[in-house]
Amino acid sequence: MQKLTAVLLSLVGALVYMLSFAALANDINNVRVWPAPDNTRVVFDLSQSPDFSYFTLYQAEPYRLVIDFNATQLKVNLSAIENESLLIKKIRTSTPKDKQSTRIVLELTEKIDVNVFPLAANDRYGERLVVDLPGRSLARKNEPLRVEQLEERKVTIAIDAGHGGDDPGSIGPSGTYEKHVVLKIAKALADIINRDPAMQAYLIRTGDYYVGLNARPRKAEEIKADLLVSIHADAFTSPQPRGASVWVLSSRRANNEMGRLLEDKERLSDVLGGVDLRIEEDDTYGYLNKALIDMSMGHAMSSGYDMATEVIAEMKAVARMHKTEPQHASLAVLTSGNVPSMLVETGFISNPQEEKLLQSNKHQQQLARSIYQGIRNYFQRRPPDGTLFATNRNSTHVVRSGESLSVLAKRYNTTIKAIKEQNDLNSNVLYVGQKLQIPSS
């Protein structure tokens, strides 16, 4: 009888242990902090879907956001978390409401209207709990050029480095993240543009954080940009494809495999970035075709195509081209109603050789320079009113006997190519009395 009792007690003990283990089956495996210029996102990576509640304590400093994770264990050292956000003083634990729970406290620098929500697992991430904190989160030195800093008489280029934060974009064979490569190219392009007295750049993303797809064209519109150029690195299901390409907006779904993959990849970006899709679907622009009904987009789409053609012409000199003409796809990042836009795929990061090239600072600089030159060529030919391009507008020259394109190029400190492009010339032959527009140097 005693043996039976002992066995029963042992079984009961084992059952209690198993039940307590099951009750604590969820784990917090990682905590990531993503500060952006106007918000901070905190992501808790969990082994299962979170069972949580939260409240704020704003009566006195330190202001606190308190999150209770029910039946959950903390498996990460909070003191080792990288935190550069101006909104968060500290992330720590506190006494839980019961022995099976974990209580995490975010000490905040100000009272914030927080947004806390779960995100389901996907192809790249497990279950998550996301905390969004709106407000200025980065020091001024890390912010993009602010709207009030933009000079009115310069051509303004909004530069969008694709992906960021929880969305790495495509990943190369050796582990290179697209989000890091394209940010370097975007910053190089901004530096080159800002050295041009007639132009200025605005970086939509300056660090490793995510910006919603529909928010990107909105930012370009807010600063009244003359162009939005989105920088990406392509990828395919096999390593063979290679080469750069430039994409512009289409009112229809893409009619080729690469275009469809690009559209699918863009939708995945918002999923990985943790954007509330219910909000995004209710956006003014819609996801694909709502804004295209507006006829005002006609000029933006036409100008975007012309600029893309100029950029391709310059990129040919520094990169293999996958496509030698602008390609069309229905992409949310290009759906501005009045800002011409293009998306530049700088190469296939899924191709081992091109992945290595895209990691090269020299190649990044060459790509940035070619994109800049293509953009500049367009605005020299079609200067917006009131800009320095328009102020220094081309002079008119009447061809005289004995003059050639090389003579005129030397005289006006320009190039034969620039004169031919400015005047849509297909040959080097000139005739006496012919009127030529000479591009400004």
Image: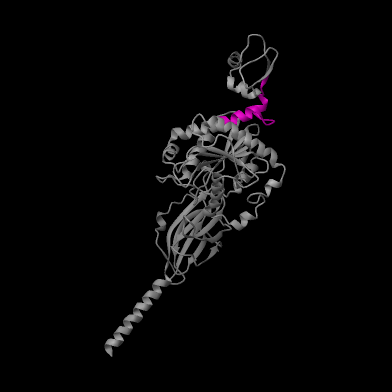
Please say if 262 is above or below 11: above
Q: Is residue 76 above or below residue 432?
A: below
In the image, 338 versus 112, the foreground residue is 338
> Which residues are drawn in magenta?
373-395
Q: In this orientation, which residue lies closer to the viewer: 435 or 11?
A: 435
Residue 85 in the image, given as x and y percentages of width and height = 50, 50
Residue in the foreground of this view, choosing between 121 and 302: 302
In magenta segment, residue 316? no
Q: Return the residue found at the far top.
A: 401
Residue 162 position, x and y percent, is 53, 44
Asked if residue 391 is among those painted magenta in the image, a careful observer would answer yes
Q: Residue furthest right?
A: 295
Q: Residue at x 58, y 22 (%)?
A: 417
The C terminus is located in which quarter?
Answer: top right
- Name the spot of residue 84 as percent of width and height, x first: 47, 49
Q: Which residue is most to the front?
A: 256
Q: Position of residue 37 (x, y in %)?
A: 55, 47
Quick one: quadrant of the N terminus?
Answer: bottom left
| Residue 403 visible, this orientation | yes
Q: Is residue 99 visible?
A: no
Q: Residue at x 33, y 84 (%)?
A: 8
Query: Is residue 112 depicted above or below 1 in this figure?
Result: above
